[in-house]
Image (tube, helix red, strand yellow):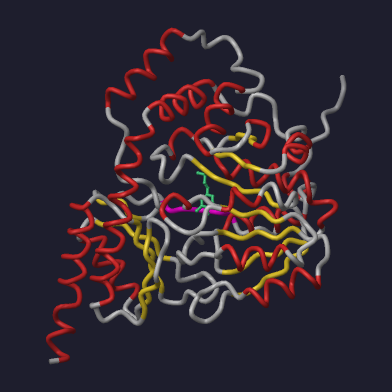
Amino acid sequence: MATTVKTPVDEALALINESVRTLKAYHLTPEICGVKLNQNENPCDWDKGVKERAAAFFVERPWNRYPDFVPDALKSRLAAHIGVTPESVIVGNGSNEMLLVLMLSFAAKAKSVIICSPTFSVYRLLRDGMGMRPVDVSLTNDLRYDIPAVKKAAADNPGAMLIICSPNNPVGNTVDESGLRDILSVHTGVCVLDQAYVEFGGFNALGLINEHKNLIIARTFSKAMAAAGIRLGYMVGAPDVIAEINKIKLPYNINFFTEHAASTILDNVSMTQKSIEMIIGERERLYDYLKALPFDNVYPSAANFVLIRTKDKQKLFDHLKKCDILVRDVSSYRLLENCLRFSIGTPEENTLLLESLKSFFEPGLRRQK
Ligand SMILES: Cc1ncc(COP(=O)(O)O)c(C=O)c1O
């Protein structure tokens, strides 16, 4: 009788890449509040009629058959929507998957990744998990992009991957056209510009794709398009570069639910325009109100969230939770000590946030008189 050789778990764990084992897991504690202002989602869901039209398709479509090998129809519609050619576009299971595909495509040659911190934490997760060399450039003390420092990092690390997020999560700051052009004038590696929030503000960099073949722009349906649940992200770049990247993307990464839901969304895109305008208006209303409260700082934002700083961060977070409002504690990020991020909700939700903030600060305000 053959003897079975058992592998103990510590031996199995020792087989995992060191770069993965040393990662701090990306984790979001599932907390439930009536008002959810913690994930920068669009607070307006799609209306039932639109969803029912998509659902009718799901009922008829055979589930035993694969989705399209390449979702060409969706890619063409998406390309037309943003004003580029279909060959410039690659689609994926959220822009997170697109970032992973980029790492797979460029890691061995780029070796290093330049990140401007604080920024979206998935960049660091992928960079460190892939074992790439970290190059961190800080934002300025007032949380803007430090263009000379980014240029220096680019010049010091020829061929590195550079990731810039604009508007930048969780701050809301942006890089403008002249800043980006300035960076691209010295950067020799691939430049990934994550524009997940661009529909809410900041400059749309798609026009630079033709000029700078090393520029790749990542976008998503998860924010302005009000479709975080369907998981659709995409990237835009020079067609020849996109064709190569496409080879490492897994086949059938877009399931037919996503594919069809995204097409339905594109049929009804005027509906998102209304919610985008509402969110921008509400962001300005919230910002003006927050500026009048005794925070240590309130940062200007071009996205669908606003970042504040207060020494009472924990008390405020807990107070808001008691008021049934969940916001994001981002105080563990570099430079963001005592910071909370408020996503923009519906006008009613934002009013509730403002009232809850007022009730938190009122005793303090009275003390100051
Ligand atoms: C800057 C940025 N990029 C990408 C993503 C991920 O988007 P997706 O839902 O398309 O994976 C997020 C999500 O919060 C984000 O803030």
Whether residue 20 is situated above or below residue 365 in the rendered picture? above
**Visible in this render: residue 33?**
no
> Residue 152's spot in the image, x, y percent?
74, 75
Identify the residue at image location x=55%, y=73%: 334
**Quarter that holds the C terminus:** bottom left
Q: Is residue 331 above or below residue 348?
A: below
Q: Quadrant of the N terminus?
A: top right
Asked whether 175 or 1 is in front, the reply is: 175
Query: Is any part of residue 181 visible from this angle?
Result: yes
Residue 287 lies in quadrant: bottom left
Residue 68 position, x and y percent, is 61, 17
Q: Quadrant of residue 328?
A: bottom left
Single out the residue that lies furthest toward the bottom.
Answer: 369
Residue stretch rendered in magenta on the structure: 25-29
Using the rendered view, name the quadrant where residue 265 is placed.
Answer: top left
Magenta residues, dominant SS class:
loop
Residue 1 is left or right of residue 305, and the answer is right
Q: Is residue 138 magenta?
A: no
In this rendering, is residue 48 above or below 39?
A: above
> What residue is shown at x 17% (from left), y 91% (from top)?
368
Q: Position of residue 349 (x, y in %)?
A: 22, 53
The reply to whether the magenta stretch includes residue 26 is: yes
Depth check, front residue: 220 or 343: 220
Please tell me which residue is depicted at 28% across the width and 57% down the height of the picture: 281
